[in-house]
Image (cartoon, rainbow, N blue to C red):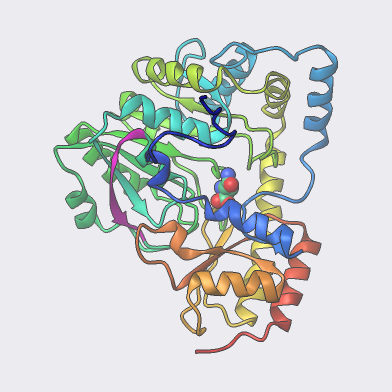
Amino acid sequence: MTSTPKRGKTTRAPFASRADVFGESVIREMTRLAIRYHAVNLAQGFPDFSCPDELKTAACDAVNADINQYAITWGAQNLREALAAKVSRYNHMEFDPETEITVTCGSTEAMMASMLALITPGDEVIVPEPFYENYGPDAVISGATPRFVPISDSDPVDEDAWRDAFSARTRAIIINTPNNPTGKVFSLEELRFIADLCIDHDVIAVTDEIYEHILYDGRKHHSIGSLPGMEDRTVTIGSFSKTYSVTGWRVGYTLACEALSGRIRKVHDFLTVGAPAPLQAACTVALSLPDSYYHGLARLYESKRQKLFKGLSKAGFRCRLPEGAYYIFTDISDFGMRDKEFARYLVEKGGIAAVPGSSFYHEGGENRLRFTFSKKDSTLDEACHRLRELDIPAD
Ligand code: GLN
């Protein structure tokens, strides 16, 4: 008599896959811990305040108007057209909405689809470090070998280190400006220097510009793709998540010449078929908001930046004001704990969730913790209150 295998039992040998090479997202894990310990979540960078009313109305209207089936895989035509106009105005780049703009499920998919579309396993990809944690697994999944080049929170790029990072095997570099987690905003001179390296070595720049409207102290955003010679070798990634406070909508996009976009579109199609149709309709409305909206957003974050900076400084964290984005990347060397232990202590005992610095480095970062200020003033006030109450063991 043959016995039926029990459910859940497998006769297969244990196997390994690429998913075993990288760990879980620490940022998302900290959010789960924040929920478990009823902590103020200053870990994951998303607003706890409302998106603009115009967007809510537009999303409901779209659902009620039966825009509930797949959009065109590359994105709804009117959204791509509105994006082409916005990018021409703000980023000084021209793209054909028919062939060069692809709407994706957030910038997360935009980055992954771009890497899968451009990389042949074994290619090297230059990743400035510290980096947003997704870029590590993105490299593994696409088969790329990452080459890390250090960036400082404020000093100009170390030109020798950048020159050394390029090799005959370099296929792409990842730029992220304004930068997560450091807040660094790359200057035009730095981008020109990097662009020249890309041109000399025939390398593609994949640039994540999701925080392009969150800038402080009069700083200006520059897109490397707008520089001469970069038109056909840049993938610019953007998103609605941070600019319009709709991180859960998952609508982002890539901008690239037709040859690159064609490949990205194929990967995007088989990965997702497309981004949510009614939310694409609402994002088209978002792009018609007046300039005052963007100025208001930067002003709002400016006051939140000051509030959290004061709270952290008073509690003994060494920190500096970021140039852009909405994170403060602190130095915890004065305390007697390393990042993971400290983050655990903070979330369990202090009621505040932050992200351990090491999740932004391939090695190192244990002396840093990242806090976001993308939260209501009342949330930040509560966090500052809890920071004051903390009994942090000093080194
Ligand atoms: N970019 C945000 C952060 O760094 C959100 C990350 C995410 O979970 N998608 O916190």
Q: Is residue 382 above or below residue 176?
A: below
Against 216, residue 198 (above or below) is above
Q: Is 98 left, or right, of 380 in this rendering?
A: left
Q: Residue at x 51, y 14 (%)?
A: 97
Q: Residue at x 81, y 63 (%)?
A: 378
Residue 324 lies in the magenta stretch? no
Closer-to-camera residue (224/280): 280
Side (left or right) of 322 relative to 304: left
Res. 214 visible in picture:
no
Q: Specify the farthest residue to the left.
A: 168
Q: Nearer the viewer, residue 90 or 230?
A: 230
Q: Can residue 113 be seen in the rendering of this structure?
A: yes
Q: How many marks?
A: 0
Image quadrant in which you'd find residue 328 = bottom right
The residues colored magenta run 142-151
Where does residue 316 sit, x and y in percent of width and height?
Answer: 58, 82
Q: Check the image and report above or below for 177 versus 284.
A: below
Q: Main secondary structure of the magenta part?
A: strand
Provide residue 371's location: percent of width, then percent of height: 60, 63
Task: Determine whether, in the image, residue 20 is placed left or right of residue 101.
Answer: left
Quarter of the image holding residue 349? Answer: bottom right
At horizontal 49% and vertical 40% (from top left) the residue drawn is: 209
Q: Position of residue 115 (x, y in %)?
A: 38, 32
- Residue 367: name its quadrant: bottom left
The residue positioned 30% from the left and 30% from the top of the image is 119
Q: Position of residue 83 (x, y in %)?
A: 57, 23
